[in-house]
Image: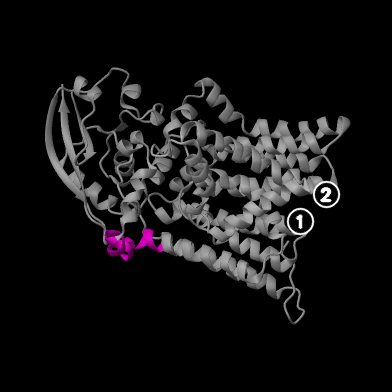
Amino acid sequence: MLRFHNIRGGPNSVNLLCLVLLGAYTLLKLRLVADVELGKDEAVYWYWGQHLDASYALLPLAVFKLAHALYPHQEWFLRLPAVLLGALATALVYWLCKMQGLAKQLALWAAAAFALSHWIWHTSSYLHPDGFLVPCWLLALCMARQAEATNALRPYIYTGLAAGLAVLCKYSGAFLVGGLGLWIALDQRGKERWHRLAAFLLPAVAVAAPLSYAQFSTDFYLPQTLSTLSRIDDLGHPLARLLFFAVSPLFFLSPFLLFLLYVGLVRAAKQRDFLALLPALCTIGAFLFFALDRGQIKGNWILPGLLSLWPVAFAVQPRRWLLVAVVATGLLQSLAIGLGLKYPGLYSDLAARSGLDKSYVGLVSEEDRVREPSYSWSERLCEYGGWRRFAADVEEVVPPLPLLSTQYSIPFALAYYGKVEREYYTVDDPRFRDLTDFYGQRKGAYLEAVLFAVRTGGTVPESLRATYPQRELIAEIDRRHAGCPSVSYQIFRLGR
């Protein structure tokens, strides 16, 4: 696949250099995640993997479950599959670019820009569905390009299999599959259209069947509960939402790379390259509707749709300074966040002086502010530390009763780092209705006493006060992490 020639004319030296660089890239990411504790979302994915079902991100969660079974309570090993898939995805981007006729050096620039973007660096370093969605989708795109070149039936089957895996990684994979289906319908003629569409759709539907069954059996409950996720209440005007939607990928990509991708979108439209264009338009269109209708805006949601544009964006043969800027700014952005998560103290003084630090709250809906009580960007960085010591401190002073919280970071992190066996539940968070919801899981069989944990300043919800009228504060414990301000949590004993 990677057949390059060095300046001496040897057939393998550049191959070896590329493999060495890819290996160094992988090892550096592993080094930066070593000893970094699980963030709140990572703890959710781990816990969900231990109680596996097909309702959400089945493929990533199954891999997390397997990794934990093989080497329990080792964060770096839990993240290892994502890191390795990041290297695979980089090779697939290079392959896709070469398949679309890009010169060797330009394909290498495109692959480097991909690997060093903050989006890919982060999602292939930590537990995140995008770390699995991206390689599955890239594989589907490569197979689709192979199908386009050969017009044989088998590549369409392979495309469907890979696309089905993408759906098992994340709901948004369905928009990508829809784009591929439209490409086949518009690109083919006569009976061949239906043969190839069936060859693509049947494997995709078969692979994604566990997710489909889970959603139909629960009346699509979980997707509906995500309607508050990443909703920005302060953006009420449609034009403000449209503008922020267009620039929101800047949280995950450098402005130079985003510019190239938007140029690629225009170029694909002009060239009527439906294979590059339609998956992007289906994804952008779907999330644009959510942005305008609900105010749900998050840059990484639309980025998988832009992957089909990657070769088109770099096929414009950008000037060397722009290529250097794309790679350099991506690397700086990735290292800044990667180092910040490992050593959050590096930015503590800067964050304290920056008025932008508090802008994080404006990007979180009112409902999610209760469920995810981080009030600044620096606190967001500090969510990846202090949980192991906090769990030990909790277990020293509280009895082994079931522990409940309205703030999901607490029960899931304690479930991972705690040593004492206890039951963990969430309250008033419908996303976890079938996983850890207290009232849904207990079904009226309530214990005489439970523990309720909340960040200091939080309140016991009305539903729990009705069930457990007796309340006693039994501990107030700080979560501390080097370079971060301590965060205080209160633990109540609730009784009937």
Visual colour scheme? one colour
Dot 2 crowding, Cα within 10 Å, few <14, some 14–19, many 20+: few
Query: Which of the two residues, 247 or 306, is positioned nearer the viewer here?
Result: 247
Quadrant assignment, res 462: top left
Query: Which of the two residues, 324 or 120, is positioned nearer the viewer here?
Result: 324
Q: Is residue 327 above or below residue 436?
A: below
Q: Earlier in the sequence, mark 1 or mark 2?
A: 1
Q: Is residue 496 visible?
A: yes
Q: Which label was assigned to residue 149?
A: 2
Q: Is residue 351 magenta?
A: yes
Q: Position of residue 434 (x, y in %)?
A: 41, 27
Residue at 51% across / 46% down in the picture?
A: 299
The residue carrying mark 1 is 99
Decide: marks 1, 2 in contact (CB < 8 A)?
yes
Magenta part of the protein: which range?
A: 339-353
Q: Is residue 298 above or below residue 55?
A: below
Q: Position of residue 272 (x, y in %)?
A: 77, 45
Which amino acid is tagged 2? Ala
